[in-house]
Image (cartoon, rainbow, N blue to C red):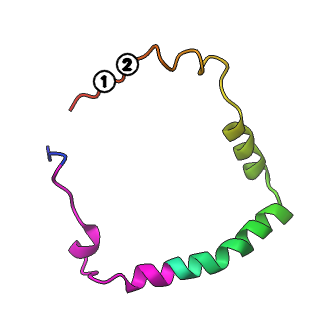
Amino acid sequence: MPSSSDHINYAHASGINSVAGAVVFAVLYAILLPYYISRAIQNPTYVFILLSFFCASEPSNASSNRGDQELTVHF
């Protein structure tokens, strides 16, 4: 089992050694993001409606149990 300090850089492992590709995709994503947001607002689907409903709602007992439980992580 690898320890928490061991990590794999998948970009370097597959031969990608520059940030140019990431920059190009980030710029394209930033340019197209307003278009996709406007399309989602103009043509809402049940997926967006249900997603916003479940993200906005909170279970009734969630606020009362936050401090009561202790998180234990076993490796």
Side of 66 where 35 appears, left or right: right
Residue at horizontal 78 percent and vertical 49 percent from the top: 46
- Residue 7 counted in the magenta span: yes
2 lies above or below 32: above
The image position of residue 61, as x and y in percent, is 62, 16
Residue at horizontal 39 percent and vertical 86 percent from the top: 20
Q: Residues within 10 Å of mark 2 (few under 14, many from 20)?
A: few
**Numbered mark located on residue 72 in the image:** 1
Residue at horizontal 45 percent and vertical 81 percent from the top: 23
**Numbered mark located on residue 58 in the image:** none
Residue at horizontal 20 percent and vertical 57 percent from the top: 7
| Stretch of the chain drawn in magenta | 5-25
Residue 32 in which image quadrant: bottom right
Amino acid, disc 2: Glu
Amino acid, disc 1: Thr
Pointer 2 residue = 70
Q: Where is the C terminus found, in terms of image quarters?
A: top left
Side of 75 where 24 appears, left or right: right
**Circles 2, 1 touching at the beta carbon (< 8 Å):** yes
19 lies above or below 39: below
Helix, strand or loop at disc 2? loop
The image position of residue 3, as x and y in percent, is 14, 45
Return the residue found at the far right: 42
Helix, strand or loop at disc 1? loop
50 lies above or below 40: above
- Residue 24 counted in the magenta span: yes
36 lies above or below 48: below
The image position of residue 43, as x and y in percent, is 84, 63
Q: Where is the N terminus found, in terms of image quarters?
A: top left
